[in-house]
Image (spheres, grey):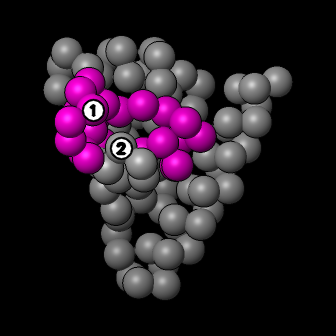
Amino acid sequence: MEVIMILNEIEIKWTRVRNFLSEKKFDGIIINRISNFAWFTGGGRNYVALNTEFGASSLLVTDKKIYLLSNNIESERMLREELANTGVE
């Protein structure tokens, strides 16, 4: 049930971001701040350390897809633990 709620939340927020991209005529937006990443993913964590406002991984959000931008060390963990079943590539 919780996974479905998070997926619905991500879809709602992705729609909001897509509308923003269309309105501003942007091709995409990078989400990197810890707070923005958590907001967009329904509580996902992109940080390793808390002494910075930016996470170790980012999301590139376009009107068609969401991509994870991460180093090799964090990418597998992020997809498995924080972004599982979300459709993020």
Is residue 67 toward the left or the right of residue 10 in the image?
left
* Label 1 residue SS: loop
Q: Earlier in the sequence, mark 2 or mark 1?
A: 2
Q: How far is disc 2 from disc 1 in space, using C-alphas?
A: 9 Å
* Residues under numbered marks 2 and 1 in contact, where contact means CB atoms less than 8 Å apart: yes
Is residue 18 toward the left or the right of residue 57 in the image?
right
Q: Is residue 27 above or below residue 87?
A: below
**Quarter in which the C terminus is drawn:** top left
What span is in magenta? Answer: 37-60
Residue at the spot 57% in from the left edge and 56% down from the top edge:
14
Local packing at callout 1 (Cα closer than 10 Å; few below 14, some 14-19, many 20+) is few
Magenta stretch: residue 51 in it? yes
Residue at the spot 47% in from the left edge and 17% down from the top edge:
81
**Quarter in which the N terminus is drawn:** top right
Residue at the spot 59% in from the left edge and 40% down from the top edge:
42
The percent position of residue 73, horizontal first and vertical second, equals 19, 15
Residue 50, label in figure: 1
The percent position of residue 56, horizontal first and vertical second, equals 23, 33
Local packing at callout 2 (Cα closer than 10 Å; few below 14, some 14-19, many 20+) is many
* Label 2 residue SS: helix
Magenta stretch: residue 14 in it? no
The residue carrying mark 2 is: 34
**Disc 1 marks which amino acid?**
Leu
**Disc 2 marks which amino acid?**
Ile
Q: Is residue 42 above or below residue 17?
A: above
